[in-house]
Image: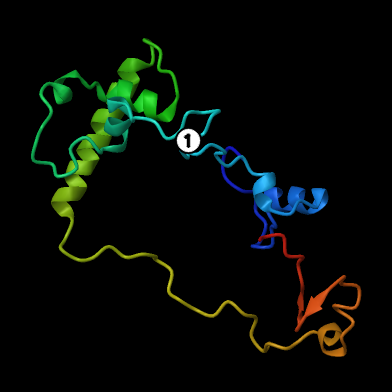
Amino acid sequence: FDFGAPPHGGLALGMDRTVSMILQTPSIREVIAFPKNRSAACPLTGAPSAVKREQLAELGLLNPGGQDVLPGTAEKEDPIDHLSWVSRIGISAAERPVMEEILAGAEALARLAKEKAGSEEPIRTVAPVSNRMRPGTREMRSKLAESGKLLKSAPSVKGNYFKVASILE
C-alpha cells in the first residue's frame, strides 16, 4: 500500500476489519496498532514527536504568512538539487548542464504564460459535460434483484442489501 489503496470500487472491507472478522475479536482495536499507553504515544515509532525544521521547510510551513524571509535560504537552494531531492532521482554531473538548460526553458515558458494569462478563472475541464449512457437505454432493476434471487445466497440480508457482521463496539 505504498501508493494508496488498490482500486476496489468502494467495496473494500479493509484489511484490519477482515482480520478482525477472521479472528472473531470483540473489537477492531485488537488488530489495529493503536497506541496502547496512557500518554497516547506510539511505543514503536515514538509518535507524536517534535517536527524538524527540514520537514517544515519541505511542506512550506516555516513561514506561512510570507512576511518573514528566512535569511540566506534563497541563495543556498539550488533548483536542480531541490528538484532531484523532491523527485528522488539522482542527477549526475554529466546530466547537470542539460537539466539547467531544461529548467531555464521551463522558467521562460512560465514567465511567458504568466504574461499572456488573462484575468479569467481557469477552466476545470476542456470537455463539455454530457450524458455518458448509451442512446436509447434507460435505467432498470435487474431481474435477479426483482425476483429475490440476487441475495438468495447471502448469509445475512437487511432490506435489499448484504448485511455485514458488526464488529465495532
Quadrant placement of the C terminus:
bottom right
- What residue do we see at 80% from left, 84% from top? 142
Residue under pointer 1: 41
Q: Is residue 43 above or below residue 138?
A: above
Q: Is residue 87 above or below residue 164?
A: above
Q: Amino acid at mark 1?
A: Ala
Residue 152, picture quadrant: bottom right
User: In this view of the protein, which residue sits in the foreground, 151 or 27?
Assistant: 27
Q: Could you tell me which secondary element the residue under label 1 belongs to? A: loop
Quadrant placement of the N terminus:
top right
- Report crowding for label 1: few under 14, some 14 to 19, many 20 or more residues within 10 A (C-alpha): some
- What residue do we see at 55% from left, 28% from top? 44
- What residue do we see at 31% from left, 28% from top? 102
Q: Is residue 158 above or below residue 51?
A: below
Residue 136, picture quadrant: bottom right
User: In this view of the protein, which residue sits in the foreground, 46 or 40?
Assistant: 40
Measured as percent of width and height from the top left, residue 130 is found at 49, 78
**Looking at the image, what colour scheme do you see?**
rainbow
